[in-house]
Amino acid sequence: MSVEANKQLVRRFYETIEQENYEARKDYCHENFVFYPQLDTPFPGLEGLVESEKKNFDAFPSFKMLFNP
């Protein structure tokens, strides 16, 4: 996969987060995925990522991702 293709993949992943499109995230995460928003706080599986991100959007409802072109 090219560098540009990797960049696009990561952008699409973060767009699903910004859009709160939790269903689409399953296309980006392995079944054994573990999300570590902090080094000592694992959130297992896609459900963990969704749980963590929902907390962020509850706290900051107008949150937007900024992408470097």
Image: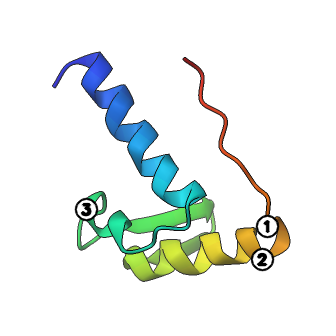
Looking at the rendering, which quadrant does residue 61 occupy?
A: bottom right
Residue 23 position, x and y percent, is 36, 74
Residue 14 sits above or below residue 67 on the image: below
At horizontal 50% and vertical 48% (from top left) the residue drawn is: 14
* CA–CA distance in space, label 3 to label 1: 24 Å
Q: Amino acid at mark 3?
A: Asp
Residue 55 position, x and y percent, is 71, 77
| Mark closer to the observer (3, 1) | 1
Q: Quadrant of the N terminus?
A: top left
At horizontal 45% and vertical 38% (from top left) the residue drawn is: 11
* CA–CA distance in space, label 2 to label 1: 6 Å
Q: Amino acid at mark 2?
A: Asp
Tell me if mark 1 has few (under 14), some (14-19) or many (20+) residues whose alpha carbon lies within 10 angstroms of its own: few
Tell me if mark 3 has few (under 14), some (14-19) or many (20+) residues whose alpha carbon lies within 10 angstroms of its own: few
Residue 47 sits above or below residue 19 on the image: below
Number of numbered discs present? 3
Residue 16 position, x and y percent, is 47, 57
Q: Nearer the viewer, residue 37 or 69?
A: 69
Residue 18 position, x and y percent, is 59, 56
Q: Nearer the viewer, residue 52 or 63?
A: 63
Looking at the rendering, which quadrant does residue 31 occupy?
A: bottom left
Q: Is residue 33 left or right of residue 47?
A: left
Residue 15 sits above or below residue 28 on the image: above
Determine contact: label 3, label 1, CB under 8 Å.
Answer: no
Query: Disc 2 marks which residue?
Result: 58
Q: Residue 61's mark?
A: 1
Q: Is residue 5 left or right of residue 37?
A: left
Determine contact: label 2, label 1, CB under 8 Å.
Answer: yes
SS at circle 1? loop
